[in-house]
Image (cartoon, grey):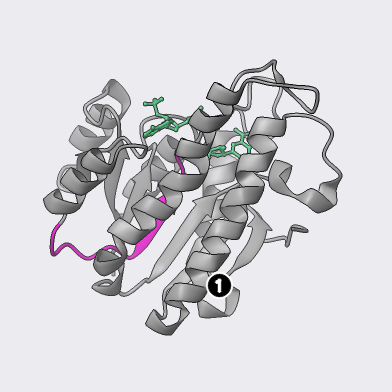
Amino acid sequence: MPQTWMITGANRGIGLAITTQLLRRGDHVIAAARDPQAKALAELASAHAGQLTPLALDVTSDASVAAAKHALAGRAIDVLLNNAGLYGPRDRQSGLDVDFDAWREVFEVNVYAPVRVAQAFLSNLEAGQGRKIATISSRMGSIGANPGNALIYRSSKAAVNMAMVVFGNAVRAKNVAVLLFHPGWVQTDMGGGGADVTPAESAAGLIRTIDASGMAETNSFRDYTGETIAW
Ligand SMILES: NC(=O)c1ccc[n+]([C@@H]2O[C@H](COP(=O)([O-])OP(=O)(O)OC[C@H]3O[C@@H](n4cnc5c(N)ncnc54)[C@H](OP(=O)(O)O)[C@@H]3O)[C@@H](O)[C@H]2O)c1
C-alpha cells in the first residue's frame, strides 16, 4: 500500500534524496519547498506522474503555512518529515562572538518551523495510517557530545529536540509517533564535499528506520541507521 509523505525542503540535499527514493518505490510525496517548481522537483514530477504534489512552503512564514494547510485540506498524510534546515554563518558562532540576527534566523527555521508545521498538519496525519512525524535534527545538538563550536547551529538542534519531545508528549494519546534523527554527516550544500555519507545512503537509512518505527520509538533521538544518540 503506497504511503504519502510530506517533506519540507524537498528541493535539494537530503530532502531531495528522500523524495527521489520514495517516488522510486511507488509512494506519494508532497514535496514542500520555497520553490516547488524548481528543476529537480519538476524533473521528478514528470518522471513519476501522479506521485508528486509540489507545495509552495516557506516554513518560517505563518501565512505560507496557512496557505499550504488550506491547499492540503482533507488530504491524509502518513509521514511528515521536517527536513528544512539552516546552518547559519560559518563565523560568529563561537561562545565569545555570536551574530544574534543570524541566531534568530536559524531558530526560525530549525526550531519554530518544525513545531509550526507539525501543528498545522496534525489533522492530516490523524487522517492517515502512518501517524509519524520525523524531524531532522543533528548530532551537533547533543549536549552529551561535549560541544565546542557552532553555537548557533548546535543550540538550535538541542532546542528542536526538546520542542519536539514536548510536542510528542502532547500527541501521544493521538497515537502519532514523534521521531528525531541525525542524518549522518552528509554531502550536501550544508555538509560540504568532505562529508562521509552520500545523500542516497542517508536517505535510504532514514527511510528504513522511519518505516520500522512506531509508538514504541516516540520521542527517540537516533541516527539514520537507527543507533540511539545521547541527548
Ligand atoms: N548535511 C549534513 O551533514 C547534516 C548533518 C546533520 C543534520 N543535517 C540536517 O539535515 C537537514 C537537511 O540538510 P541538508 O544537508 O540537506 O541541507 P541543504 O542541502 O542546505 O538544504 C537545506 C534545505 O532546507 C530548505 N530551507 C531552508 N530554509 C527554508 C525555509 N525558510 N522554508 C523552506 N525550506 C527552507 C532549503 O530550501 P532552499 O533551497 O529554498 O534554500 C533546502 O531545501 C537540515 O535540517 C540539516 O540541519 C544535515
Q: Position of residue 173 (x, y in %)?
A: 43, 84
- Which secondary structure type mostly characterizes the magenta part of the structure? loop
Q: How many marks?
A: 1
Visible residue check, residue 165 = yes
Residue sitting at x 82%, y 39% = 147
Residue 130 as seen in the image, left or right of residue 71: right
Q: Which residue is mark 1?
A: 218
- Quadrant of the rendering where the N terminus is positioned: bottom left
Residue sitting at x 57%, y 51% = 160
Secondary structure type for disc 1: loop
Q: Give the magenta-colored segment's residue range.
A: 73-84
Residue 198 as seen in the image, left or right of residue 20: right
Residue 101 painted magenta: no
User: Closer to the camera, 15 or 152?
Assistant: 152
Residue 106 as seen in the image, left or right of residue 54: right
Visible residue check, residue 188 = no
Answer above or below: position of 200 versus 89.
Answer: below
Answer above or below: position of 4 versus 13.
Answer: below
Residue sitting at x 42%, y 45% = 113
